[in-house]
Image (tube, helix red, strand yellow):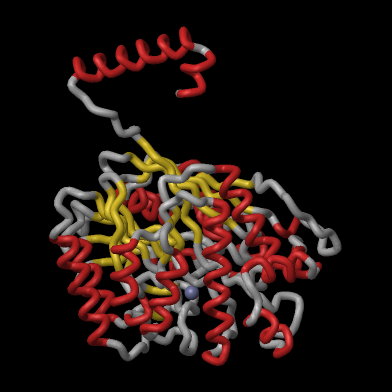
Amino acid sequence: MNFIKKHFPALGLGFLVLSATVLSFTRISGTTAKAPLTQKCLIVSDIHFNPFYGTTVGDSVLKKKLENASFAEWKQYFEGFAPQMAINSNLLFKDANYGVLQSALFNMKKRLPDPAFILIAGDFIWHGATPADSVLKKKCILFIAGLLKEYFPNALIIPAMGNNDTYGQDYALQDSKFLNDFASAWEPNLPGPSADSLKARGYYTAETGNLRLVVINTASLNLGSNYKPQADAMLKWLDNNLANANGKNVWILMHIPPGINAFNKKNFWNVASSDAFVHTIVKHAASVKLIIGSHVHLNDFKVVYDNARMPKPVALMRIVPSICSNHGNNPSFEVAEFNTATGNIVNETNWYLNLATIPKDKETQQLTWTDTLNTAKSLEMKGLSAVDFSKLIDHIKADKTGQMIKHYADFYDVGTKADSAIFINHATYMNYLKADSLREK
Ligand SMILES: [Zn+2]
């Protein structure tokens, strides 16, 4: 402004007049700055970054080197080690290397440079890490958080913890040291009060506009876990929180989803916790606009139904696919567009990189991810509400041509042909559709 006034006085005056006009118009119309009708956010999950990629997991020399290295030295090491940089079909069925993590961030930034917020549904740590790797685990989370902050310095970042995100064994409840280190890693992009709650309890809320983001920790809920007092306390906290939503639209973020795992037909959570959660969601369904989980690395959904004689679909859970390709899936991230007044998703696109098309011997960097999967289009849906997803289940069940089963398999597999044969096909699809219902008891 000073520069304009000094060098272009007439232009500066013109700018002032224009500003005044805009202001008076605003006063006449009686509205203050209008919130945009829709906003877009990024949703990612299951990064499983492996600092040992291309070497032996647990390599003691490398472990020591990385434990004592700075953020810049981590980058330097990975950039100088070809297997860590190579983005090709070798990544299928493996954890993420630095190349694909960086490529994911580069493409997230390209598609949505200024997201309303970034949700990360957990599992940052590589598979096979042990309690003896705690120093490296801490550095790994700091490294990933540091990269996200580099690409999105001003974004609100909301992370959930996955089963691998613990200083204990896989699936162990996090100790206070982990909670402190994890929460600190995301500050200040994770706001102070949210970080404080995460440090104290492992779960928290964050608010932006008319949206309340509620993040729960599924470590105490997982099937076979022995943390009933912690699980009960958290579910009670969730119930209280939803009862006091005060007109805010609520999105709930977690790692392991409740309900049945179609892959092994077992429950994901302890049944009592799952039932209590579904009951709470039904009770507060007017506030709960979206539930997000991950863990399976593939694309799916669950519809929450009440316990009426004709069960009514009341809430929607989206299960988002992963950045790492450990389950034979392609690396991917979601861009979700939501209505700022209602909190409902209005459009959702998954961007992925088709690894099978990149030759193993080619080391490709600065790749643009061009493959997309639009949820509504690919599943022939009119909208993205719980009712729409409930209709989709009926549509797939009723489809005798096999076309809808194919669409569902393509959606589930995120462009990976290998998984269609392994997971969903004509013989198995009903297991998945049955698992896609969460019914109140
Ligand atoms: Zn997981």
What residue lies at 32% left-to-right and 91% top-to-bottom? 226
Q: Give 398 or 363, whichever is nearer the viewer.
A: 363
Using residue 214 as the reference point, say whether residue 400 is left or right of it. right
Q: Give 169 or 315, whichever is nearer the viewer.
A: 169
- Specify the quadrant of the image occupied by residue 55: bottom right
Using residue 152 as the reference point, say whether residue 202 is left or right of it. left
What residue lies at 60% left-to-right and 66% top-to-bottom? 324
Q: Give 150 or 92, whichever is nearer the viewer.
A: 150
- Specify the quadrant of the image occupied by residue 56: bottom right
Residue 434 appears in the figure: no
Which percent across, then down, holds residue 99?
70, 62
Which percent across, then down, holds residue 235?
22, 74
**Image quadrant occupied by the N terminus:** top left
Which percent across, then down, holds residue 33?
28, 29
Q: Give 278 or 288, whichever is nearer the viewer.
A: 288
Using residue 288 as the reference point, say whether residue 97 is left or right of it. right
Using residue 215 as the reference point, say whether residue 414 is left or right of it. right
Q: Is residue 424 above or below residue 18?
A: below
Residue 297 appears in the figure: yes
Which percent across, then down, holds residue 417?
66, 60
**Furthest residue in direction top, as rendered:** 10
What residue lies at 43% left-to-right and 74% top-to-bottom? 261
**Furthest residue in direction right, as rendered:** 361
Count the labels in the image. 0
**Image quadrant occupied by the C terminus:** bottom left
